Image (tube, grey):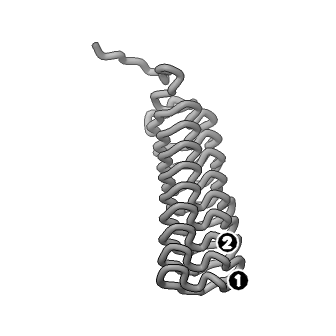
Amino acid sequence: GVVQTTQDMKVNGVTVGAGSDLNDLNTILGLNAFQSNTIGQLNTAIGREALRANTEGSNNVSIGVSAMSENITGSQNIAIGVASLKQNQGTRNTAVGHSSLNKATDARENTAIGWGTMINAITGSVNTAVGDSALRGLTEGSENQAFGNGSLTSLNTGSSNTALGRNAGSTLT
């Protein structure tokens, strides 16, 4: 039969529902997912601890274990992959891949696609990294483009760099 309820449900320890504030504009599926929300709306959290700490962030999509788990106020972000955008507090970031944009606490309008892309970026804006470990060493910087596995991996604080190809610009710091 069909089970209907106006409350979140726990099925084998997994939360299914709209989150701690029972806002029907949110979609939640996962153990400890979205457990702190107070006013955030239009969020999707799928996976263990996905958007766990979110209180105010809205318009986020978080899919994967610990994806955006420490986000509190960041909005309009997409995180797909284990620990992607884990520490995020920024806006309009897209991270696809294990640990991509993992440490981004004050970053905005970045795109990271691939395992470990921009994993150390804390601040910065309008960066694009595509490929395994691309822009891996970047902690702060803006308007960098790295396309290819290992491209711009050592760049730490630079801005306005472009690298195309495997390991391209990997010695730039």
Q: Give the mark count.
A: 2
The amino acid sitting under disc 2 is Gly
Question: Could you tell me which secondary element the residue under label 1 belongs to?
Answer: loop
The answer to whether any part of residue 59 appears in the image is: no
Q: Quadrant of the C terminus?
A: bottom right
- Measured as percent of width and height from the top left, residue 67 is found at 56, 48
Question: Could you tell me which secondary element the residue under label 2 belongs to?
Answer: loop
Spatial CA distance of label 2 from label 1 is 9 Å
Q: Is residue 156 left or right of residue 62?
A: right
Tag shown at residue 173: 1
Query: In percent of the image, x 56 and y 72: which residue is there?
Result: 134
Tag shown at residue 3: none
Residue that label 2 marks: 137
Query: In percent of the image, x 67 and y 72: which residue is there?
Result: 137
The amino acid sitting under disc 1 is Thr
Nearest to N terminus: mark 2 or mark 1: 2
The answer to whether any part of residue 6 appears in the image is: yes
Measured along the vertical axis of the image, is residue 92 above or below residue 125?
above
Mark 2 touches mark 1? (CB < 8 Å): yes
Mark 1 neighbour class, 10 Å CA radius: few under 14, some 14 to 19, many 20 or more: few
- Measured as percent of width and height from the top left, residue 133 is found at 57, 68
Query: In percent of the image, x 47 and y 20: which residue is there?
Result: 11
Q: Is residue 146 or residue 50 the one in the foreground?
A: 146
Q: Quadrant of the N terminus?
A: top left
Residue 118 placement: quadrant: bottom right
Residue 49 placement: quadrant: top right
Q: Is residue 64 left or right of residue 136?
A: left
Q: Residue furthest top?
A: 1
